[in-house]
Image (spheres, rainbow, N blue to C red):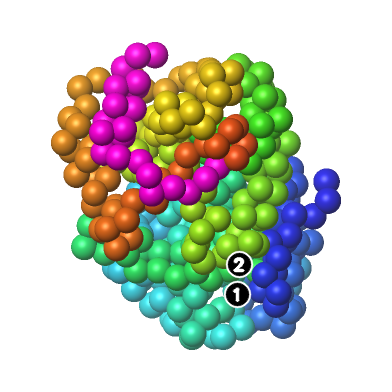
């Protein structure tokens, strides 16, 4: 496998996808060796399962390692936890040469990235994702953030890591439902950029336990790297990564984050967006069926009794963040996502009915 590069001039970095990488992590360090200390930010169970091996490997290579353990759950992406992390870093004599290692899923990655972007005006950090979702999406591209006053990611920055090290072996302890959630995002990459990849996914998702995770993660990382390279700040092209997300976010907010996982909601959102694309004559029937049947092979939660008003309330809330404009992602053919403002509330509500039909 050739290196996957996010090419951003002097902020360019490599995404390494390597089974067992966690056990020889020091081989993948890219920063200058003269660092004060390395700070692993993680959760308790992840630290026990993987972090200790990582720590041993780094200590054996001569580094001082600090551990910072976060409480479980999305609540940990707030200012209180941020405060605790910074306090612990100051107490541990961290300085401008300290390096953060984010060992975890999206929450750990987001808060650790934000800590790195703000501690002493910015220090280096590595993303070491442990969930399938984080491996294919949130660990790449430098989006960092905190929730504040019940608003998600309202405080944050785009701050790129020194490297992203993906060890697919870490999926061995990932709960099945988290794998399904990650597969939703993987299908998204086929839908927006690579019809051939989607054809493979149609076969591969039949058997989720024996799914070729490493191969699929590599392809998703390549696609995400290409997109971030072209549009780091999400002024245009990067928006296509939000395929399925407008309706997906509304479903997550409506049903509650405990009822539906992010990638599951995105999968359902993709069905709706594909239906709108098909209805508008952008996506032919064969391609529409291929995408829908691939998604239908995932064991997704059954949706009943959606309240259309609530769905539109959440979608309109997202719109407010974009100066009143709803940038919707459709497929102008499979593997060819487009950004459009030409999707009406009526079309969105009609598309949601499709969720009850399968
Ligand atoms: N998760 C979408 C993005 O990184 O832009």
For the C terminus, the quadrant is top left
Quick check: marks 2 and 1 in contact, CB under 8 Å? yes
* Residue of label 1: 124
Seen as rendered, the residue at the extreme front is 281
Number of marks: 2
Image quarter of residue 343:
top left
Query: What SS does tag 1 mark?
Result: strand
Graded by Cα atoms within 10 Å as few (under 14), some (14 to 19) or many (20 or more), the crowding at tag 1 reads many
Along the polypeptide, which appears first: circle 2 or circle 1?
A: 1
Location of residue 287 with respect to 195 vertically, above or below: above
Q: Is residue 349 magenta?
A: yes
Does the image show residue 152? no
- 47 or 257: nearer the viewer: 257
- The dot on residue 161 is 2
- 43 or 78: nearer the viewer: 78
Residue 294 in the image: x percent, y percent? 55, 21
- 9 or 66: nearer the viewer: 9
Residue at left offset 46%, top offset 57%: 108
- The dot on residue 270 is none
Q: Which residues are magenta?
A: 337-358
């Amino acid at each position: 496998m050739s290196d996957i590069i996010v090419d951003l001039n002097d902020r360019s970095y490599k995404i390494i996808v390597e089974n067992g990488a966690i056990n020889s992590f020091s081989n993948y360090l890219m920063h200058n060796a003269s660092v004060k200390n390395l700070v692993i930010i993680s959760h308790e169970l992840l630290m026990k399962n993987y972090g200790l091996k990582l720590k041993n490997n780094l200590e054996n290579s001569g580094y001082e390692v600090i551990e910072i353990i976060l409480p479980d759950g999305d609540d940990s992406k707030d200012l209180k936890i941020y405060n605790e992390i910074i306090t612990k870093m100051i107490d541990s004599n961290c300085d401008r040469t300290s390096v953060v290692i984010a060992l975890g899923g999206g929450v750990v990655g987001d808060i650790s990235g934000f800590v790195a972007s703000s501690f002493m005006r910015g220090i280096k950090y590595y993303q070491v994702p442990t969930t399938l979702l984080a491996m294919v999406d949130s660990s790449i591209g430098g989006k960092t953030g905190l929730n504040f006053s019940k608003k998600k990611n309202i405080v944050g920055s785009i701050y790129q890591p020194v490297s992203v090290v993906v060890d697919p072996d870490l999926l061995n302890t990932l709960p099945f439902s988290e794998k399904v959630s990650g597969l939703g995002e993987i299908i998204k990459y086929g839908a927006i950029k690579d019809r051939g990849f989607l054809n493979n996914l149609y076969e591969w998702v039949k058997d989720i336990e024996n799914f070729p995770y490493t191969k699929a993660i590599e392809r998703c990382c390549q696609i995400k790297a290409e997109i971030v390279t072209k549009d780091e700040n999400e002024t245009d092209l990067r928006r296509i990564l939000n395929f399925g997300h407008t309706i997906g976010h509304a479903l997550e907010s409506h049903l509650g984050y405990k009822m539906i996982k992010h990638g599951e909601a995105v999968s359902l959102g993709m069905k709706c967006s594909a239906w709108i694309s098909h209805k508008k004559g952008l996506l032919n029937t064969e391609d529409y069926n291929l995408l829908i049947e691939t998604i239908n092979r995932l064991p997704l939660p059954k949706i009943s009794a959606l309240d259309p008003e609530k769905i539109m309330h959440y979608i309109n809330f997202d719109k407010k963040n974009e100066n009143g404009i709803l940038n919707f992602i459709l497929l102008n053919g499979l593997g060819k996502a487009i950004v459009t403002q030409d999707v009406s509330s009526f079309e969105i509500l009609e598309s949601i009915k499709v969720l009850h039909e399968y």
